[in-house]
Image (cartoon, helix red, strand yellow):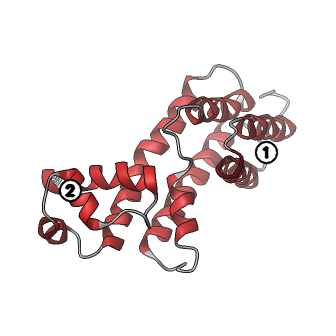
Amino acid sequence: MSEKPNPTRKRLVDAATKLFYAEGIGRVSVDAVAEKAGLTKRTLYYHFKSKDDLITAYLDGRDQPNLEQMAGWFDATEGGADRKVAAIFTNLARVARHPKWKGCGFLRTAAELASMPGHPAVKAGSRHKTKFEKWLAGELLSHGVREPKMLAREIVLLMDGAFSSMLIHHDPDYITAAGHAAATLVRARMTDAAA
């Protein structure tokens, strides 16, 4: 029997998600999160030991929805693995054109915590990236692509590189270019039967 989600905790995480993603974790105080949630700071600290715990909950809350979104784009695309991988990047570029898009929340948080590699939120980001890479390797394997683990890692490098370039240049064309490169890498490793 699964535990019922705590509505107050969810309210706090939802408020933190909106604020942390929009402004960054360093610029948002626990007071601001409590206010956004319509709760007291005392209530926030009843549900979270520290701001660090709240930051970690914010990233943990983004993990599954982000993975499901990427998998949905992949699954909805007709054709071979190259087209399916390209679709992830095409959809990321589309989303990146929205004025509220601020990039990858996992990378942005890790950048803010660069001097704290053992921080629980950095570990949450690492778990997310690892899950995506393993999922992608499994999909590539099931599509008959050679060296799926290495290829998945190369695609993650292209994706995260594109996210980093987007933070600097604010130009979604970097994601599009990374998608072309990823599709080329996939095509180079597709078996004759899968091509």
What amino acid is found at the position of numbered circle 2 in the picture?
Glu
**Residue nearer the viewer, 65 or 34:** 34
- Pointer 2: residues within 10 angstroms few (<14), some, or many (20+)? some
**Where's residue 51, x and y in %?**
32, 71
In the image, residue 195 sits, relative to residue 120, either above or below, namely above
Number of numbered markers: 2
What amino acid is found at the position of numbered circle 1 in the picture?
Arg
**Residue nearer the viewer, 193 or 26:** 26
Which residue carries the number 1 mark? 146
Which circle's residue, 2 or 1, is located before the other in the chain?
2
Q: In percent of the image, x 78 and y 35: which residue is there?
A: 183
Which residue carries the number 2 mark? 35
Depth-wise, is mark 2 or mark 1 nearer the camera?
2
Q: Is residue 97 in view from this perspective?
A: yes
Q: In percent of the image, x 52 and y 34: which residue is there?
A: 99
**Residue nearer the viewer, 169 or 10:** 169
